[in-house]
Image (tube, rainbow, N blue to C red):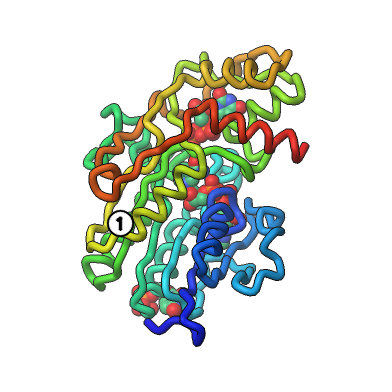
Amino acid sequence: MARNAYGRKRTLVTGGAGFLGSHLIDRLIERGDEVLCVDNLFTGDKRNLDHLVGHPRFEFMRHDVCFPLFVEVDEIWNLACPASPVHYQHDPVQTTKTSVHGAINMLGLAKRLGVRIFQASTSEVYGDPHVHPQQEQYWGNVNPIGIRSCYDEGKRCAETLFFDYHRQHGVEIKVARIFNTYGPRMHPSDGRVVSNFIMQALRNEPITLYGEGKQTRSFCYVDDLIDGFLALMATEDDRPGPVNIGNPREFTIRQLAEKVIAMTGSSSTIVERPLPQDDPLQRKPDISLAKEWFGWEPNFALEQGLDKTIAYFKEIS
Ligand code: NAD
Ligand code: UDP
Ligand code: UDP
């Protein structure tokens, strides 16, 4: 595929106005790409890209990936999809459409152009896992008809489409299964646990612990995650993945609440709220494949990442 007339790589990022997409775009701009961000601003925020407005190598297009897209690019990153349970359950039909129709359209585009495409898949494909930590070979334990299914099954179907376009049409794919990630530019009212707890702590409001807080998650700082994305996409082999990208240090949600209260010096108390339906009990990535394949592992300890994230939320509130 020919690059633009100046020899620059033209890179498409769907969902680029969101939390992860905007960090990815910063890194792509830094490495010299010409970036086209496609986003319908369902959960994304143009303020995440404010610093790029007017940049000669950045362009924003408001578009819903459920509809076909005809552009000329050299590489595609497909991140478009709401990621917070509150958001993806707000319009569940649209969530499934975004994953499935979005994947079909972006794969159709990759096929026509003969370019490599990255898929932002998720640890949710493992559902409420019976295998711990989760390895890529595990097929998962997903409820097909619950309130999380629009996201979990949408992402599982997207993976199916990626692998079928790869086998059937020879499309070059790289599929990353992302585990809980946090950092600056998460939306303060996005409903995910790290942003909720920090915002509540900063306002000295009660910290809403769902259930008894015994469920676990493993939190990856955004800079580490984007390093992993770039390393995976740069692999010059035809291995499609899927590959886990996340931080294997596991914490209970109660531990997270206590850590956030301590780090913010907050007077917040912890209040228990009902555990949402199908909330996975435990989650921790096995990252041996990422280490062996492209030498990636995370560097940020939870305290370091929380420090930066708390500073960000203080700045914007
Ligand atoms: P986010 O909600 O901040 O970003 C998603 C972006 O996609 C938003 O800008 C939104 O407006 C856009 N979008 C949604 N539907 C769209 C559509 N139909 N057409 C065009 N744009 C659309 O979420 P995020 O945390 O940045 O997640 C990015 C991707 O990574 C998602 O695909 C998500 O499923 C995946 N992921 C994230 C995490 C995490 O912890 N952050 C974990 C696993 C997977
Ligand atoms: N598509 C797109 N941009 C392109 C090429 C295809 O959005 O540059 C969409 C197209 O509209 C189609 C989908 O991708 O709905 C799948 O394309 P594919 O070629 O696999 O299937 P077909 O067009 O034969 O249905
Ligand atoms: N959670 C919580 N309080 C909140 C938000 C979330 O206790 O205010 C819990 C939630 O029930 C889940 C975990 O924190 O067990 C992570 O939730 P999040 O929505 O961030 O992501 P998930 O991993 O569930 O997709």
In the image, taking residue 49 as reference, residue 116 lies left or right, namely left
Task: Return the x and y of residue 314 as percentages of the image width and height.
Answer: 74, 33
Residue 239 found in image quarter: bottom left
* Of the pair 196 and 31, the residue shown nearer to us: 31
Residue 267 visible in the shown view = yes
Position above or below: 290 against 80? above
Which quarter of the rendered picture does the N terminus lie within?
Answer: bottom left
Task: Return the x and y of residue 265 as percentages of the image width and height.
Answer: 70, 16
Task: Return the x and y of residue 280 as percentages of the image width and height.
Answer: 42, 28
Residue 189 found in image quarter: top right
In the image, taking residue 279 as reference, residue 133 lies left or right, namely left
Residue 157 visible in the shown view = no
Q: Give the secondary structure at mark 1.
A: helix
Residue at position x 36%, y 59% from top? Answer: 233
Q: Residues within 10 Å of mark 1 (few under 14, many from 20)?
A: some
Residue at position x 70%, y 59% from top? Answer: 51
Residue 201 found in image quarter: top right
Given the image, on which type of amino acid does mark 1 rest? Thr
* Of the pair 240 and 292, the residue shown nearer to us: 292
Task: Return the x and y of residue 99 as percentages of the image width and height.
Answer: 45, 56
Position above or below: 248 against 2? above
Residue underneath mark 1:
160
In the image, taking residue 74 as reference, residue 167 lies left or right, namely left
Which quarter of the rendered picture does the C terminus lie within?
Answer: top right
